[in-house]
Amino acid sequence: MAIEELEQKLKDVIMSIPAYDTDAAERARRHSDQLTKPPGSLGKLEEMAARLAGISGKLWPDLSRRAVIVMAGDHGVCEEGVSAFPSAVTPQMVMNFLHGGAAVNVLARQAGAEVVCVDMGVAAELSHPDLISRKVVYGTANMAKGAAMSREQTLQAIVAGINIAEEKAKQGIALFATGEMGIGNTTASAAIASVLGGLSAELAVGRGTGTGDEALMRKIEVVRKAIAVNEPNPGDPVDVLAKVGGAEIAGLAGVMIGAAANRCPVVIDGYISSAAALAVARLAPGALPYMLASHLSHEHAHGALLEVIGLSPIIHLEMRLGEGTGAVLSFHLIDAALQLMTEMATFDSAGVSKG
């Protein structure tokens, strides 16, 4: 597609996102209040059930078919020494996902979820029958010296994510989770959070894969430099993703938009996924009600980032792995919320006096 067609495709999909069904959500809340418990006593589980009703337009949607979309891409900013791991780990971990050996694979099997692995911008040739290749770059350029990607490449990545969500929804997937792999992507995410979320570089930058104090300070300076060099426009999220983002981050933004357009809830993983979610909240506000925040990452800026987006995490386990692990873990709580609403007795059916 030419860049004009990509821009139009993105605009059309954003315009097609259905409105959140507030009536269905309210019906779910009224039903919850009739169950044999004090009103609100199941806390976030009750609100989650109501959100899922509002998203789907159905009182209790069937979310048994679910997938975690794990997008991978390399980052040229690793040249600046911002990661404790070499870029070679990205393609190695992609193959680990495809062979079923990563943490997200284990947790996805436990949750009955499909793992969909997508090469958005890995700086290596990868081949596997289960790999979806939508490579728009062989690793981004070093954002400390110039734009990470062109606008056209960024739009290609976003539209690829939209298309994958659309294809999976047509295949019956009703619940999505976001995951990623890309050495250096916490640096890109920090830059996105700083530009779009108004967070200082000191707050936005965390240790990522475990960088030491000296590397942390270098990472903060790299984020400052990348923003100064590229001058990304905070009023144009695509420009921000292009200049200081990554192919996998843009792809995840597309998945979130595509899921919303197909009336599917999408569970956001940790810091990198939340950076993509922030871009989506600015680009397509209608997609925001379709997002559920899975967990509070151990990355110290994640809480501030979620607050900027307007999302509240479901769990807090001090995780910082990425891959979609926190999002997939949250599937169990989503199942619990729906099962409680469908299987609990009401005061009338159980013959219990209501206070």
Image: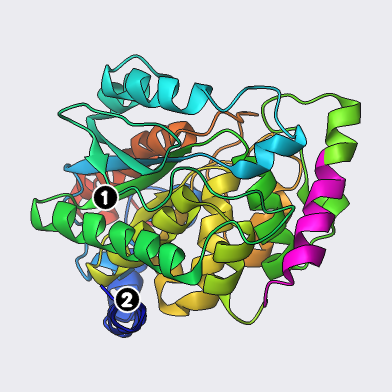
Residue 309, above or below 17 = above
Query: Which of the 4 quarters of the picture holds residue 122?
Result: top left
Q: Identify which amino acid the numbered label 2 is placed on.
A: Leu
Q: Which x, y percent locates residue 64?
A: 17, 42
- Left or right, 59 with respect to 254, comes to left
Placement of the C terminus among the 4 image quadrants? bottom left
Q: Which residues are magenta?
A: 219-233
Determine which residue is flagged by label 2: 6
Q: Secondary structure at mark 1?
A: strand
Q: Which x, y percent locates residue 210?
A: 73, 24
Q: Residues within 10 Å of mark 1 (few under 14, many from 20)?
A: many
Query: Which of the 4 quarters of the picture holds residue 15?
Result: bottom left
Residue 190, above or below 199 = above
Query: Which of the 4 quarters of the picture holds residue 126?
Result: top left
Sequence-earlier tag: 1 or 2: 2
Q: Which x, y percent locates residue 141?
A: 59, 50
Placement of the N terminus among the 4 image quadrants? bottom left
Tell which of 154 and 326 is nearer to you: 154
Q: Identify which amino acid the numbered label 1 is placed on.
A: Leu
Q: Which mark is residue 351?
A: none
Q: Which x, y percent locates residue 230?
A: 72, 67
Classified by dominant secondary structure, the portion drawn in magenta counts as: helix
Q: Which mark is residue 175?
A: 1
Q: Nearer the viewer, mark 1 or mark 2?
A: 2
Q: Residue 349, can we see it? A: yes
Residue 61, above or below 210 = below
- Left or right, 153 with respect to 186, comes to left
Residue 72 on the magenta span? no
